[in-house]
Image (tube, rainbow, N blue to C red):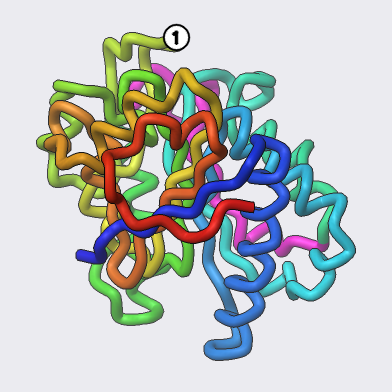
C-alpha cells in the first residue's frame, strides 16, 4: 500500500487542467512500456471537467486511444440513456470525440439492460468482465489498472462506498449498493479490493465543502468511517486538490508545490 502524496492547485479550473495533463503523460508512458493502457473513470464535477479539459487539449492526440481500456469506478443504477450516468457524461465530455475501440470501453450495466431489476446480478456480470480482462495479463480477477480516478464526497464517500456502508466491508470486486444516502439510492461500485488493484489511485477533490473529509482521510480516519481513506494504489496514491479542498489539511502534512 502506497503512502498518500498531496498536490494542491490554486483553483478548481487549474486542478482539472493539471489532472488532464497528468493523464496524458500517464497513458502515454503506459503505452510506451506495454503497448496499451487502462484507466478507471469517475463522475462528479471535477471528474467530468477533467475529461472536458482533456478533450480541449492538443496533447490528447499523444495518446493512442485505440489502445486505451476504459472502465468505471461506480455508476448510478439508471437507464442507459440517463444524463445522470457517469458513462453518458464521460462520452459527451471526451470519449465520443476520440477514436476509441468500442470493445475496450466497459460501462457498468444499466437499469434497463439485460439485468434490469437485479443490480446484484449486474455487479456479478461486471466482475466477470473484469476477471476476463485480468486473465489476459495474469493479474488474478481484477486488472492492474494504470490509473484509477476517484472523487471524494462531502461526507467522505468515494466511488459509491459510503460511510458505515456494508460495501466498506465487502470483499467482492464489484458491489451492488442499495439505500445510498444520495440519489439514486441504488448504484454499482468497485469495492476496495478492486480499487486497490490499481497501480495508481488519484483522488480528485475541489471546493471548501470537501475540506473536512479530505483532512479526516489524510489524518488517519478509518475506511469504514470515511471510505476515501481506504482508497490506495499499489505504487502511488495521489490526492489532487484545489486550495479550498486542502484548507483543513493536517499541520505538517507534506505537500508538493502549489500552482
State which quadrant residue 225 falls in: top left
All told, the count of numbered labels is: 1
Magenta-colored segment: predominant secondary structure = loop
State which quadrant residue 157 falls in: top left
Q: Which residues are magenta?
A: 99-119
Give above or below for 114 relative to 219. above
Give above or below for 194 relative to 122. below
Q: Position of residue 91 (x, y in %)?
A: 73, 41
* Mark 1 neighbour class, 10 Å CA radius: few under 14, some 14 to 19, many 20 or more: few
State which quarter of the image contains the N terminus.
bottom left
Q: Residue at x 38, y 35 (%)?
A: 159
Q: Residue at x 54, y 36 (%)?
A: 243
Q: Position of residue 42 (x, y in %)?
A: 52, 41
Left or right, 84 with respect to 228, comes to right
Q: Position of residue 162 (x, y in %)?
A: 27, 24
State which quadrant residue 183 falls in: top left
Q: Nearer the viewer, residue 34 or 255?
A: 255
Secondary structure beneath dot 1 equals loop
Q: Residue at x 28, y 68 (%)?
A: 234
Q: Residue at x 66, y 74 (%)?
A: 67
Left or right, 257 with respect to 234, comes to right
Left or right, 97 with respect to 134, comes to right
User: Magenta includes 67?
Assistant: no
Q: In this figure, which residue is indicated by the disc labeled 1? A: 183
Name the residue furthest bottom. 33
Q: Nearer the viewer, residue 229 or 143?
A: 229
Amino acid at each position: 500500500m502506497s503512502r498518500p502524496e498531496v498536490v494542491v492547485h490554486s483553483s478548481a479550473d487549474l486542478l482539472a487542467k493539471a489532472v488532464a495533463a497528468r493523464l496524458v503523460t500517464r497513458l502515454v508512458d503506459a503505452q510506451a512500456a506495454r503497448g496499451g493502457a487502462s484507466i478507471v473513470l469517475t463522475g462528479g464535477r471535477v471528474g467530468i471537467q477533467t475529461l472536458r479539459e482533456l478533450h480541449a487539449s492538443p496533447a490528447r492526440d499523444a495518446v493512442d486511444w485505440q489502445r486505451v481500456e476504459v472502465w468505471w469506478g461506480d455508476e448510478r443504477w439508471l437507464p442507459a440513456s440517463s444524463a445522470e450516468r457517469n458513462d453518458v457524461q464521460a462520452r459527451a465530455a471526451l470519449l465520443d470525440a476520440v477514436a476509441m475501440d468500442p470493445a475496450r470501453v466497459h460501462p457498468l450495466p444499466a437499469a434497463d439492460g439485460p439485468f434490469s431489476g437485479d443490480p446484484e446480478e449486474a455487479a456479478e456480470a461486471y466482475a466477470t468482465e473484469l476477471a476476463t480482462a485480468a486473465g489476459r495479463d495474469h493479474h488474478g480477477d481484477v486488472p492492474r489498472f494504470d490509473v484509477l480516478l476517484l472523487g471524494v464526497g462531502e461526507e467522505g464517500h468515494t466511488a459509491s462506498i459510503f460511510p458505515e456502508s456494508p460495501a466498506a466491508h465487502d470483499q467482492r470486486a464489484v458491489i451492488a449498493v442499495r439505500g445510498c444516502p444520495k440519489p439514486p439510492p441504488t448504484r454499482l461500485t468497485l469495492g476496495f479490493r478492486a480499487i486497490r488493484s490499481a497501480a495508481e489511485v488519484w483522488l480528485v477533490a475541489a471546493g471548501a465543502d470537501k475540506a473536512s473529509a479530505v483532512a479526516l482521510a489524510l489524518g488517519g480516519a478509518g475506511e469504514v468511517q470515511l471510505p476515501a481513506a481506504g482508497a490506495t494504489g499499489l505504487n502511488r496514491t495521489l490526492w489532487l486538490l484545489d486550495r479550498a479542498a486542502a484548507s483543513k489539511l493536517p499541520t505538517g502534512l507534506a505537500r508538493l508545490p502549489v500552482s
